Image (cartoon, helix red, strand yellow):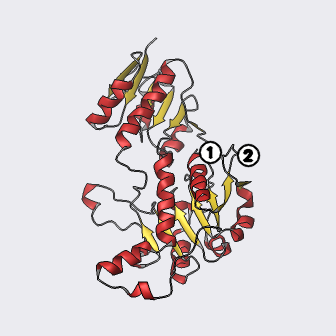
Amino acid sequence: MPLAVHLLEAFEPAVLDALRAQLDPAVQLTAGLNVPPEAEILVANAPERGHLTASPALRAVLVPFTGVPEPLRALLLEFPALSLHNSRWPTVPTAEGAVALLLAAAKFVVPADRALRQHNWEMRYAPSPSILLAGRTVLVLGFGAIGQLTGRMCHGLGMNVIGVRRRPGAPALDYPAEVHPVGALRALLPRANVLIITLPLTAETRGLVGAEELERLARPAFLVNVGRAAVVQEAALYQALKDGILTAAGLDVWYSYPTDAASRAHTPPAQHPFHELDNVVLSPHRIDLVREHNARLAAELAHSLNAAARGEPLPNRVDVAAGY
C-alpha cells in the first residue's frame, strides 16, 4: 500500500529534489497549501485546524525541526487520534552552538573583538574577566538528546556535568554525569557555575528560571539558552546580568521576533536593552542553522517517511500533553 504524505511547507527546490530522490517508491508525495483527502502524514511547521481536518485519513503530523510550536501543541490536544513527531537532526548543530556561546561568553570573545576592531588593546593589559571552564560544573536543564550531547561536549572540556530532566531514570551515557529530576533544580544550582538551558517551552517550563534561581548559581555564574527564551524570566535575566549576579550569558533565543520581512532589520529581541550590556553574546536564533541544513533535513525526513512506508512506527514521537 502506498503512503500518502503531504508537505504543507514551501521547501526550497533543492530540498524537495533531495527528498524525492531518497524516498521509497511507496511514498506518494504531494505539496502545497491544500491538503488532499487521502493524506496520511502531514509535514508542517504550523498547520491550522483546517489542515488537520482536510483529510479523513490523516494520522500523524511531522514537524521538520526540533521542538513544537506552542499553538500547534495546543491545537493537537483537540485531535488525540493524531500523533505528533518532530526532527532530531538539529541536535548536533544546536549542541555545538550551545558550547560556542558558552566559550564566547566565558572568554569574553565579543568585547575583545569589538575593542580590537577599534585598535584598542586595553583588554590585553587589564585583569582578565575570563574563567577556566575545566574543573567547573555545568548544569544542563533539559537533558534530552540536545542536552545529553551538550553535556558530552562540556565533559570533553574537562567540566563536571549535571543533567536535569523531566522523564524518570538516567539515560545511557558514554561519559560520567549526574542525572536528577526537575524537582531537584533549586538544590543543584549552588553546585553549578554554568547553567545551559535546552528546554522546550510548555506551561511547566515557562518562567521556570527567575531571580531566585539565578541568585543560587555558584560564582562566577554563566548562563546559555538555546531552548526557549521564556523559560527564563526576561526581567530577572536582564537584572542579573546588569548587576553582575551573572558574569555573562550567551543567548540564541529571544522574547520578541520580527512579525514580517519588513521588520527584520529593526526589531529588538526583548523589552529590556540586552544589547547595551557587554557581558551578553547575542545570536538571532540561528545557532542550529549550518551549511549542511538542507541536505540533513532532506535525509532525516526521508528516513522517517521511509520507515512509515515500511509499516514501522514514525520516529521521534512527541508527547503532546508534555510538549516534548
Q: Identify the element where label 1 is drawn.
A: loop
Q: Going 63% across and 54% down the picture, which residue do you hit?
A: 204
Q: Which mark is residue 73?
A: none
Q: Residues within 10 Å of mark 2 (few under 14, many from 20)?
A: few
Q: Which mark is residue 168?
A: 2
Q: Residue at x 75, y 66 (%)?
A: 187
Pointer 1 with pointer 2, Cβ within 8 A? no
Q: Position of residue 254 (x, y in %)?
A: 45, 62
- Identify which amino acid the numbered label 2 is placed on: Pro
Residue 289 in the image: above or below residue 82 = below
Where residue 167 sits: x, y (%)? 69, 46
- Corner quadrant of residue 194: bottom right
Q: On the picture, is 36 further left or further right than 144?
A: left
Give the residue drawn at x 51%, y 25%.
Answer: 59
Which of 85/21 is in front?
21
For disc 1, the marked residue is 322
Name the quadrant of the C terminus: top right
